[in-house]
Image (spheres, helix red, strand yellow):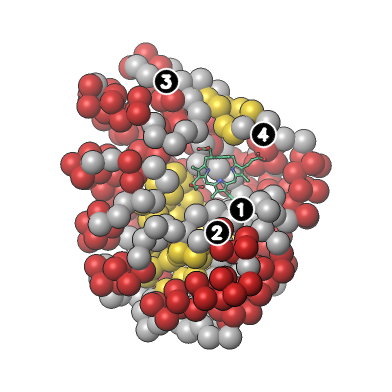
Amino acid sequence: MIAKPILTVLSGQPVWPPPVWMMRQAGRHLPEYKATRAEAGSFLNLVTNPELAAEVTLQPVRRYGMDGAILFSDILMVPWAMGQKLWMEEGEGPRLTPITDMAGLAALRPGELRAAAAPIFETVSRVRAALDEANSKTTLIGFAGSPFTVACYMVEGRGGSDFVRVRQLAYSDPQFFARLIRVLTDASIDYLLAQLEAGAEALMLFDSWSGLLSPSQFRRWVIDPTAAIRRALAQAAPHIPVIGFPRLAGPMLADYGSRTGMQGIGMDTAMDPRWAAANVAPEMALQGNLDPLVLMIGGIALETEARSLLSAMRGRPFIFNLGHGIEKETPIEHVTALLRLVRGG
Ligand code: 1CP
């Protein structure tokens, strides 16, 4: 068995030049993705079609030789698999029928999650088989959204930028909110374990909206449930590494790093990598955090930013990535130029 660079880094050992993958690497910046998406007809058809979902998961690996293959799915498939209605509003984004009270929560069917999400686990198995078949060094990364971030969408029924209603609700009805977070914590454990059983080699928890919370709320709704998920996974599969991505957490990243038991921490675009390096344990892998906009712009700006990130991370376990998802207007040549630069050391 060949060593996979991402798994080596997540075990706490630096690899240089660092392994690289990009958040949202499968998606609309790739012409082959657009073709497969058109064939599927809709985003949800694509996610629930294991043959096509495995194909788009592998497209960026084939084109760029990425060291990570992120499962093609979405964080909102967990509420969907528990029975919450989910659809994509063309050109706008996801929509769900909002759940704001105990009755709405009681109507969810967490017991049916595994059966409903079976096509997603089938995608994981297919991708893993294809990577094994090719004797690939690429690591298959499964994922879920973190309870707080998924709760934001479940309560408001759509994406947003501040989720004021959700944050108010967490104060005004902590009993309901705690129950929702509890349901999501258990569902995420179940969902992630099923991905491991299907062949995922590492896991990632996306907490895109954690940075909206005050420190006390961050500890309660982000750190505690994340640590609970990590503990449950460790019990079932002690050697599986997990990467946490508490986006815009700022200095709370230090507590998140020391208290959740992660093997890797994703840095968002706003995080200073030198601050992160000084404030999380040296054996913990850092991942990130090139600005997706500078990748879109390219040229000398891209080269300068990429070199500065590399020099900040040199000598520690590090996975090169973006600070958030790749922009759909990103030219393919910018991605290939960046990969050349990173791999040149
Ligand atoms: O065709 C379309 O319109 C669908 C666009 C799309 C895609 C390509 C959505 C809807 N989801 C995805 C795939 C996706 N989402 C992946 C797998 C692909 C990859 O990374 O290569 C992953 C890991 C996600 C995770 C995800 N979904 C997050 C966490 C990361 C982040 O970006 O912060 C979040 C917040 C979502 C919710 C979501 N799903 C889709 C959209 C457009 C959104 C954002 C909605 C919003 O808040 O405005």
Amino acid at dot 3: Ile
Query: In this rendering, does residue 124 appear at all?
Result: no
Report the residue marked by disc 2: 292
Quadrant for the N terminus, please: bottom right
Depth check, mark 2 against mark 3: the one in front is: 2
Q: Name the residue under label 1.
A: 327
Residue occupied by mark 4: 91
Residue lying furthest front in this view? 300
Q: Residues within 10 Å of mark 1 (few under 14, many from 20)?
A: some
Q: Which residue is drawn at 22% across and 27% down?
A: 171
At label 3, counting other C-alpha atoms closer than 10 Å, the crowd grade (few under 14, some 14-19, many 20 or more) is: many
Tell me the residue that label 3 is attached to: 99
Front one among 34 and 251: 251
The residue at the point 18 percent across, 41 percent down is: 216
Q: Position of residue 268 (x, y in %)?
A: 42, 57
Q: In this view, does 280 lie to the left or right of 186?
A: left
Confirm if mark 4 falls within 8 A of ligand 1: yes
